[in-house]
Image (cartoon, rainbow, N blue to C red):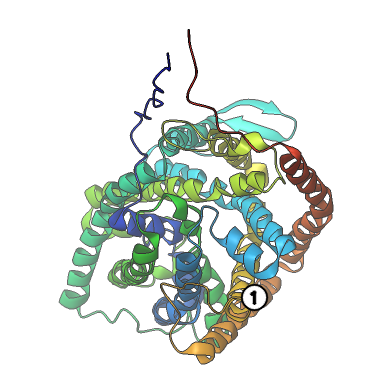
Amino acid sequence: MTAVPVAPAPNRLPAPKRVRMMPLVALIFFSVSGGAYGIEELFSTSGPGMAILLIMVTPLIYSVPHALVVAELGTAIPEEGGYYHWVKRGLGKFWGFQQGLLQWICSFVDMAVYPVLFTSYLQSLVGAVAPGEHVLFRLGNLQFDLNWFICLAVIVVFTLLNLLGAGWVGESSVVFAVVCLLPMLILSVIGIAHLVGDGINPVGSLTTGADQSTWNAFGAGLFIVMWNYCGWDSVSNVAGEMENPRRHLPRALAVSIVLIMVGYLLPTIASLATGADGDAGWQNWEAGSFSAVAEQLAGPWLQVTVTVGGMFAAVAMFSALLASNSRLPVVLAKDGYFPGWLAKESPRYRVPIASVVGSSVIYAVFCLSSFTNLVIFDVFLTNIGILLEVAALIALRIKEPSLERPYRIPGGWWSIGAIVLSLLGVCAWAAWQQYVESGTQAVTYGLVVIGGSFLLYPLLARRARRVRDRAAQQPAPVAADLTSTAS
């Protein structure tokens, strides 16, 4: 008789959590900013008036132009790996490879900053965790102390969170945003009350003093504030895990720009109530100084509150950026440049386990103090990536005019021309300012990395071709005959 074919059992695993609208805003917030924590040095470098001006102007000449590029390309090509696919499709495989690999390498030093920043805030509460305070062992020139093991613990915790998928990272980021922003809101209310009650002019001085020119103050501060306003494209790497990215991404970018700018302005203006002199005065501000400001304005309770907020901001930024950066090895592996096992996903959460864990291991190594000076080329490589995305935008407008673009930059080529001039000018100025501050070191580091990537491409491109050839030679799967005859 003829056996009745049995349908395969349905996949009973629930679909992984998608990144919804509010979690997407939170992911962008932490990919770019994380709040005012860390922007204090801008005021001691450029003066209060120029710092406030830069916080308001930089989004117009740097953030908004880049966010517009991300909105158009991210909605036209909403794929996992984001800007890798934009550049590959617009400029070709060679430049796509450079974009993916260089931004992943850039993440090695960028991501190491956040666990170190967490321990820096913790150090203000517990002095025993200071770098070098409790050295457990050494390996050559590398020093493994209590500070590094705390960094390692942070990395392990948020790697485990990332293994649940970008959806859960986004949901947790909403909670972290509340924890981070609430202390700054309290600081803002108390500080502004002091400004009004004491009749203090927060921007009485434009620059740091009479010996600093307006142009010098603008240039020195622009480089600092750029680091606090970059990263708008990071969230595109998890576009494949978003809920309706073509609708939500442009809206989330617009909301995030306003949230981040206000998140910088209110606490910094309020903190100027401490004046210019003293430990909490703006002339002596450096990363982490908001804790001292909080203590002077309201006492130890607010100091602890702000410090804890800074700790959560640091780890939330690490978590959000790990979700983004860990997708870069995945798309490179899918195209054959990296081993295929890097792209394999867990069956339950659809997360690339090897890529997430492998990236975290690298970040843990770069948390060692011997590598912290490498962060000097972070902005250099980031800006190269931004300019490649702008070039891809132009190329796709020319090559694929009929490509569906749910969001299209208004104003046509006039707007694109303004974006090119703005971003090119800002990036060129930042490179020059970096040269003025550190000589050829940043440029040398950057060129070494870029040169290595250029040399690596022919080798990995051959590997990718072999992978594609083997896949093409494999016979196509034949549908199984679901009927059989049994006697």
User: Which quadrant: the N terminus?
Assistant: top left
- Residue 240 at x, y percent in the picture: 46, 52
The structure residue drawn at horizontal position 53% and vertical position 83%, both measured from the top left corner, is 419
Task: Give the labeled residue for mark 1.
Answer: 433
- Residue 14 at x, y percent in the picture: 33, 34
Asked if residue 213 shows in the view, the reply is no
Left or right: residue 399 versus residue 59 is: right
* Residue at the far bottom in the pictured view: 414
Which sits in the foreground, 475 or 19? 475
Amino acid type of the residue tagged 1 in the rendering: Gln
Q: Is residue 444 above or below residue 165?
A: below
Left or right: residue 254 versus residue 404 is: left
* Residue at the far top in the pictured view: 487
Q: Residue 253 appears in which quarter of the rendering?
A: bottom left
The structure residue drawn at horizontal position 62% and vertical position 37%, both measured from the top left corner, is 342
Left or right: residue 147 versus residue 332 is: left
Which sits in the foreground, 196 or 14? 14
Which sits in the foreground, 60 or 55? 60
Asked if residue 469 shows in the view, the reply is yes
